[in-house]
Every structure is written in C-alpha cells, then in structure tokens.
Amino acid sequence: MSFVNCKECGEEYSMKRAKLGYHLCLECGDQRANRIANFRSKCSAPAYNKGAYQPMMSTDDARWAGK
Ligand SMILES: [Zn+2]
C-alpha cells in the first residue's frame, strides 16, 4: 500500500485517493470543500455583482471624465 503526502498539511493519505484526483488528505479535502461552499454562499452575489459592474462603471467614469 503506498501513500502520498497531503499538499496542505503534509499528512500521508492513500494513493488510491490521489489517483481519484484528490491532492489533499481526507481532512483537508473536507475543509476545502466546506470553505468553498461557505465562500460561495456568503460571497457569490456581491462578488459577482461587483465583477460584472466594474467594467460598466469604468466606462461610465470615462464618459463622465470626458464631459
Ligand atoms: Zn491534509
């Protein structure tokens, strides 16, 4: 049975898991999944709006500046 080291904490985890495409141990993988879920539920709306509006804002700013 071979093991690989978790990229997050250095803990060894099963090579089988690595072959499934996981580069983190079970614990870190869960933590990351939770973090992403939290991030999405908490930040997706404002972050996306900002990202979408920023280009529009800058063209508006340019128009205002040229007036
Ligand atoms: Zn880990």
Image (cartoon, rainbow, N blue to C red):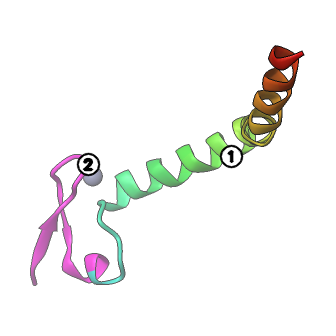
Tell me if residue 46 can be seen.
no
Look at 9% across and 80% down and name the residue there: 2
Question: Residue 51 colored magenta?
Answer: no
Q: Quadrant of residue 18?
A: bottom left
Residue range of the region highlighted in magenta in the rendering: 1-18
Disc 1 secondary structure class: helix
For mark 2, what is the residue?
8
Between 51 and 25, the one lying in front of the other is 51
Return the x and y of residue 56 as percentages of the image width and height. 83, 36
Left or right: 47, with 64 as reference point: left
In which quadrant will I find the C terminus? top right
Calculate the distance from the C-alpha at mark 1 to the C-alpha at mark 2: 21 Å
* Kind of residue at badge 1: Arg
**Label 2 packing within 10 angstroms: few (<14), some (14-19), many (20+):** few
Tell me if residue 38 can be seen.
yes
Return the x and y of residue 27 as percentages of the image width and height. 36, 53
Question: Residue 7 colored magenta?
Answer: yes
**Up/down of 4 relative to 54, above or below:** below
Return the x and y of residue 10 as percentages of the image width and height. 15, 51
Look at 29% across and 60% down and name the residue there: 25
Residue 40: numbered disc: 1
Return the x and y of residue 21 as percentages of the image width and height. 35, 77
Look at 22% across and 46% down and name the residue there: 9
Whichever of callouts 1 and 2 sits on the residue coming sooner in the sequence is 2
* Label 2 beta carbon less than 8 Å to ligand 1: yes
